[in-house]
Image (cartoon, helix red, strand yellow):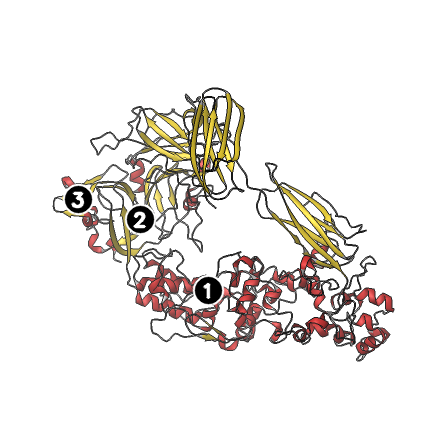
Amino acid sequence: MNGSNKLSLRADTEGKQSGGRMKRSVTLLLTAIVAMSLVSSAFALPTAVITPKGLSPTEVAANANDIYDIKSSGLGNVGIGEKIYLAGSPRDATITAWTWAMTAKPANSQSALSATDVQVVSFVPDLSGTYTLTLQVTNPTGQSAAVTYKVNAANYVGVGGITGAGDVNAPECYACHNGDAAPDVVADWRETPHASAWGRKYNGEAGSHFGPNCVSCHVTGYNAAQSANNNGFDDRARAEGWVFVDSAHGGLVPGAWDSMKAHYPETSKMGTIGCEMCHGPGSRHNANTADNKISMTLEAGVCSQCHESGSHHIYPTQWKRSGHSRQPEESRQGCVDCHSGRGFIDNLAGVPDSLANLSYVPIGCATCHDPHSEANPKQVRNVAPYTFLNGVQADIGLGNLCIRCHHARTDVRTYPATRPGARFSPHYGPQGEMFVGTGGVEYGRQMRNGPHAAVIENGCVGCHMAATPAAGAGLNKVGSHTFVMADTLGYEHTEVCAPCHGEVESFESFQASGDWDHDGTTETVPLELQGMMATITSRLPRGINVPDTNYTLQQKQAYYNYIFVTQDKSNGMHNAYYARDILQASIDDLPVGRTQRLTLARGWNTVSINITPAPAMWVAGAQGADVVRMLAGLRIDANNHRVSIMKDDMGNFYLPQFGFNNIAYWNLADGYQIKVTEDCTIDYTGMAINPATAVPLAEGWNTVAYLPNYLLSADAPNMPVVASIANHLLVAKDDMGHFMLPAFQFSNMAAWAPGKGYQVKVDAACNLTYPAQQQGRDATVEPIVANHWTAPASTGSSMSILLTDLNATDGSQISAVSKSGAIVGVGTVQAGRCGLPVWGDDKTTEVVDGLTDGETFSLTLWNAETGIESAMSAKMVLGSGLTFKVDDIAVAKAIVIETLPTNFYLGKNFPNPFNSTTKFAFGLPEAGQVSVKVFDLAGRTIATLVDGNLTAGNHIAVWTADAAPAGLYLVKMQAGSFSDTRKVTLLK
């Protein structure tokens, strides 16, 4: 770029400060409380479920003062005498009270709940049988609902087939399940380490450290408490007189297990990690599965009983640090395959998604490991090669299981050409393709690959599940079942790299093989890739924002490669060469310039551009483009122009109709007001401006350009888009009259967007620097849309009013009304506040379409709940009252002026049609007897909503029609001689 093309960002700031930039007075007022009448409202019934709670020894030991004092499986099927914990799990946030009761139990049982009024309770079943627990939950309005859960208590029977004949009175699992049709779970289980763990270790194969404390996790039904007499291992051992013999007394030697089976056969029947360890005791099962007579769960609680003790058994501790344990809950078909443990297992088995039955379960132990089968290493469920959607097959050993979820959900061969839109991406998980070197747009080139896929045994598993450090800051925070390579405190598991790369300080320290991004410096791999991605986004019309339908195929393909590398999330560590090559191919395929489109609505617009226009647009010897040439594309013909006027914030303007212009040049740091005669667009092509370029602001009002090519949130309270001037910003507003007031933590502005300009007032000279966009779009609160009144069009000048602490329903509207009755401003109530612009008169038109300075106006409230309009008075805490002044700001306490109805009325219900609940406004000019009833078309009374004496005024009747079938109904009001009927439609 030559000197005349360089971006000038207000080089004349001092001149503007001293040269009389528009001065507009502003008063920031204190917030106030507005009292409004509360109307009747209906709340949905509270909902909850009862779930048994699994607890590991580590969780029990974490707090000596809580209710948890013994580990628990989390099953609803427990041994007699074994404590079970039950939690009320809320399904909404309105529950204020919990009331438990044991509503049924076996005859002569003395079992009782530990408490009745807390969220989590426990009890110890003392007899065999079913225990019914009822939980009643209550919400703040006093409404209650109940849910029940049945716990089964039984004796242990053993898996069978260990010492010989079974017990005919309580058949062992082997009796029914041996020889099951495929899969034969008993036969498969016998091949697993769980089946033989006790025998091997009692024979001394685990060494002398195996001691009495290890017994409980290597046998079935162990609970040392005398009260837990349920025929488990410890009970049988007491009956037969078996005691643990350690190596010091001649035990833990080959043959010890055979000797035990010969001398203690009943105890030995439980000498295995058998079915009942994961499914609960089986004496009451015998093919009966009702009321938890056998249980199954994919929750980690069952495994955590033995695999999480806080020392050498730590896999669940590690797992809780992984993303698998907190996978976002999804219920959509296609998503459950990887967002729910049951969905993943069913998908592996070829079972179609059954959304009604797929409740959310984290990706836990039993999701990846099959407890019944040793067919694959580490008992993982599947290690078959996996074929990506683009047809490329990967075979990376145990990592094949990982890439069944960690792969792109798109076929890159067709997707970019057919799918621009809101979800345009590989869908967050292309790590599998990146690792093996496929999945990007390759433009017919031969892409290079790094060596990782060829040399790292088991692919993903080889690095992400490498042993956790033996000690130090990374212990159990990275590696193994955490799957984490770098923890949130900055520890990086670079020991994984040492065998090939030597001692490595950080993953960020790997040097690139050259200056990939062509900035003149060879940097680290992450920095070089970031530079290449910045080059791509600088050439795209929407930068890092999702493509729209105007994107060319070239642009969509380049964006796809950019997001593919971004969503890989490894900063090049998975496959730096492949990432580099697909990015370079995209850069080579993209034109150097970028196009920005300004979309102008009929009337006034505030606009800016974030590219440096082509040299042909520039004013010779000036610091910006020529305004006349920039707007030439909006000319209709030699005598007509779509632009009526363009003006800057210094009062300079361009009038195409009269061939007049005194705007020296288009300053790229400035925004401009443009009034057009019809909806239109205009495109500009040039080099992208660095979005982090500082925009100088003078004290007072400035109309500024928006430089990023991505959206930034303007939501209160943080208002990220203006974070850099937070200490100086008084007010900002857009061309629709929406505004932000940082002092009051208020904003009703949409996210700031490319092509828009904004008015900003600061209390001192400062620099506005836009922040970088976080991965993903900045969260923006969606505004409530109300349409009782239609907001007037922008007139190019406005006053801003903030009404705070409104006790009005969200979606209600407040209008500003001139003395002549014209609506000159409309705002919507949201979260108890309402910001509305009051529009001034547009001096460029002959008609009076707004207020002039000093003209008064009034406020009116429309209540979305009642449908009633009410006058409002404004008590100004500070300020000049309801008097218009251009660019003034007022914050006021508003008071609803209640008036009695002049006639009886029955209003239309809202909503209509409705599902479940609807409301009717009705009014009485005098007190008296009133009835409001609902009838079906046959004339039968369905519901009585009101029946009694009421005071004069406006009222609300609520019909909650949960029990009524869908259809047409009549609502009739009777008050003295007045009668009126409304038709309402109930949908289900």
User: What secondary structure is marked by label 2?
Assistant: loop
Please name the residue shown 76% across and 75% down the image: 162
Closer-to-camera residue (346/252) = 346
User: What secondary structure is marked by label 3?
Assistant: strand
Q: Residue furthest top?
A: 926
Q: How busy is the neighbourhood of tag 2: few (under 14 within 10 Å), some, or many (20 plus)?
A: many
* Quarter that holds the N terminus: bottom left
> Can see residue 233?
yes
Comes first in the chain, label 3 or label 1: 1
Which residue position holds label 2? 755
Where residue 91 appears, x then y in whole percent? 58, 48
Where residue 391 appears, x then y in whole percent? 42, 73
Which residue position holds label 1? 568
Please name the residue shown 12% across and 44% down the image: 639
Lateral position of residue 511 relative to residue 598, left or right: right
Q: CA–CA distance between discs 3 and 1?
A: 49 Å
Is there a contact, CB below 8 Å, between mark 1 and mark 2?
no
Amino acid bearing label 1 = Asp
Q: CA–CA distance between discs 1 and 2?
A: 31 Å
- Residue 641: give its label: 3
